[in-house]
Image: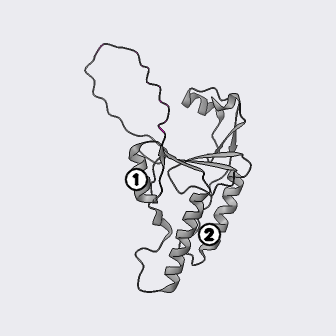
Amino acid sequence: EGLSNCHDIEFVHHQPALRKEQLEAFTGLDLRRVALRYLPRNPAPAATSLFSWRLWRQSSRWSEALSRPYETFVNLTHGAPPVCHARHGVLIVLFPFFKRKWMRDDPPRGIDPRRRLRNACYDFEWCQRMRTYSHITCISEFTRRWTKAYWDIEATVVYPPVNTTSPSLPKQDVVLSVGRLSSSGH
């Protein structure tokens, strides 16, 4: 909402039924000046391919459709970030839910040169992917530590804005259970 006052903002998403009114109701923001663009998810390639350059090329083509149209591309993610084709890339890691070696054949079995070559290609691909982002941030110190441990990248902590105003009410005896709600489970 704040950025849309002086910039053209487009929210790219992967939910075919998502509407701007839903986002406004959920966030409490005025999104009249924000455009929505639906882009289906990148089909997950088979990570067992000996031809990792094909995986890189497929991923790069999809992410080009995702980020090429923009001067600045801001990506919020739990998963492997797409290659950023915008002039400026900002990666915001919510939490790195997988280890960097997700594509690798670890531990390598024997001295198979094809596996070693494939693992070297995956490592190269990961480094190239991360280099496309000029800024890498995390939403907490906790996430920063796990991003370093899982993805072996340094990130700056930028805490998300939180509305901390609340009404002052009399104390009540209440049992409160808090959990994270998402489309993938609780």
Instruction: Give SS at disc 2.
Output: helix
Q: Residue at x 42, y 73 (%)?
A: 106
Is residue 116 visible in this depiction of the protein?
Answer: yes
Q: Report x, y in % for residue 152.
A: 45, 60
Would residue 169 be counted in the magenta stretch? Answer: yes
Q: Residue at x 63, y 73 (%)?
A: 53
| Above-or-below relation of 176 to 185 | above
Q: Report x, y in % for residue 57.
A: 67, 67
Residue 17 location, quadrant: top right
Q: Which residue is mark 1?
A: 146
Segment colored magenta: 158-171
Foreground pick, 122 / 59: 122
Taking the image as shown, residue 114 lies to the left or right of residue 108, namely: right
Taking the image as shown, residue 95 lies to the left or right of residue 50, namely: left
| Above-or-below relation of 33 to 89 | above
Taking the image as shown, residue 71 lies to the left or right of residue 55, namely: right
Q: Amino acid at mark 1?
A: Trp
Foreground pick, 174 / 95: 95
Tell me which secondary structure the magenta stretch mostly adopts: loop
Q: Which residue is mark 2?
A: 55
What's the distance in space between the residues labelled 2 and 1, CA to CA?
A: 26 Å
| Above-or-below relation of 51 to 44 | below
Quarter of the figure with the C terminus? top left
Residue 107 location, quadrant: bottom left
Foreground pick, 172 / 96: 96
Q: Report x, y in % for residue 138.
A: 48, 45
Quarter of the figure with the N terminus? top right
Q: Residue at x 59, y 60 (%)?
A: 129
Instruction: Give SS at disc 1.
Output: helix
Q: Nearer the viewer, mark 2 or mark 1?
A: 1
Q: Residue at x 44, y 40 (%)?
A: 181
